[in-house]
Amino acid sequence: MLGKRDPRIHVDLAHLRGLKGRARAISFRPRQPSHSILNGQHASKIKGRGLNFEELRHYAMGDDVRTIDWKVTARTGAPYVRVYTEERDRPVMLIVDQRMSMYFGSALNMKSVTAAEAAALAAFRVRAKGDRVGGIIFDDHGWQEVRPQSSARSLNRFLDRLAEANCSLNANAPLVDSTPLSKPLSAAARIVKSGALVIVFSDFDGWDEETEKNLRTIAQHNELILFSVLDPTSEQLPPDLDIVVSDGTLQAQVNIGDETVRRKLADFSTGRLASLLQFSAKYAVPVVPLTTAQETLPQLLRLLGGQVAGGGAKK
């Protein structure tokens, strides 16, 4: 059909809504499958939080001995365990980068598309679990806030603003000063005080001391997960590649075969990733890598312990 959007370049509201129900195996809860990238990385940060006591019951073979209630066991003469259920209705903030630095892709998707799809899948999943969904979508002109609420209306508002920001990205847009990464993170720190789950989807362009400070503030009293959206060209630059780059007004050809150019581009990319990984190691904040070279849903299922189902291709 003439004028139909290419979902590898832009994702509209209908596309994002179409992701509902396709990520049932994804979990952002403290208890992760053994092969999830989050297993063992962030559970300790929320120990004692996010679980509600439900009942006492007799010990059964295979129960975790750490759940045994020794006082009740001593009083009754039989082993009892304490059963907990995961707390519902916690606030979840999804922070999604839709700046021009994300409007790039050399393989399958634009980085902006991968981030938007991952955020939409996360929004549907956490809402289905009974949590409050909200978020911050930011582009080169500022950001929009959707406060976490337990309603379909709040979820739809988040998806609508995300689709609008994604579809507004345009290679011919005039050059403007980009929104500093630290600004929407500062807004998130103001909104979520404690006990929330905060997930950031970004290429982390513009990482600086203020960015690290704001992320550290969030991580002190909340669970924080960073999804780093990468393009394969930033990981391995083909030696014989010539590319055309544009700032929205002018364009120029860049010879990647030039050793000086290759070194500068590689230093820029690896330097940003190094800062991110150093922060991760220092503050025990998990970093989950997403690539534009693969479909978003299968990646999330593999990384977060789900089963990859068939039929994951875009329609």
Image: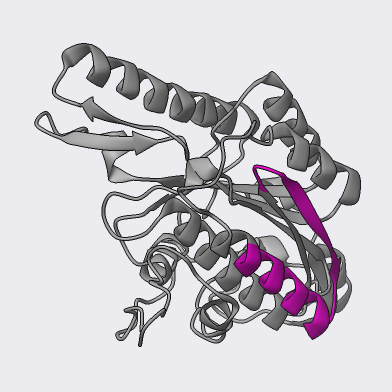
State whether residue 11 is above or below residue 203: below
Quarter of the image holding residue 255?
top left
State whether residue 310 is above or below residue 256: below
Magenta-drawn stretch contains 142? yes
Segment tinted magenta in the rendering: 139-164
Quarter of the image holding residue 216?
top right
Q: Position of residue 169 (x, y in %)?
A: 54, 55
Residue at 13% over, 23% down? 257
Magenta-drawn stretch contains 140? yes
Most extreme residue toward the front, as rendered? 249
Asked if residue 14 can be seen in this view, the reply is yes
Residue at 23% over, 36% down? 243
State whether residue 44 is above or below residue 51: above
- Label tally: 0
Residue at 75% over, 49% down? 143
Asked if residue 81 can be seen in this view, the reply is no
Q: Position of residue 88 (x, y in %)?
A: 81, 75
Most extreme residue toward the left, as rendered? 240
Q: Is residue 226 left or right of residue 306?
A: right
Q: Nearer the viewer, residue 210 or 264?
A: 264
Q: Position of residue 203 (x, y in %)?
A: 50, 41
State whether residue 186 is above or below residue 6: above
Quarter of the image holding residue 197?
bottom right
Q: Position of residue 120 (x, y in %)?
A: 59, 70
For the N terminus, the quadrant is: bottom left
Q: Nearer the viewer, residue 67 or 231?
A: 231
Q: Is residue 87 left or right of residue 272?
A: right
For the C terminus, the quadrant is: bottom left
Residue at 17% over, 14% down? 259
Asked which colour scheme the image uses, the reply is one colour
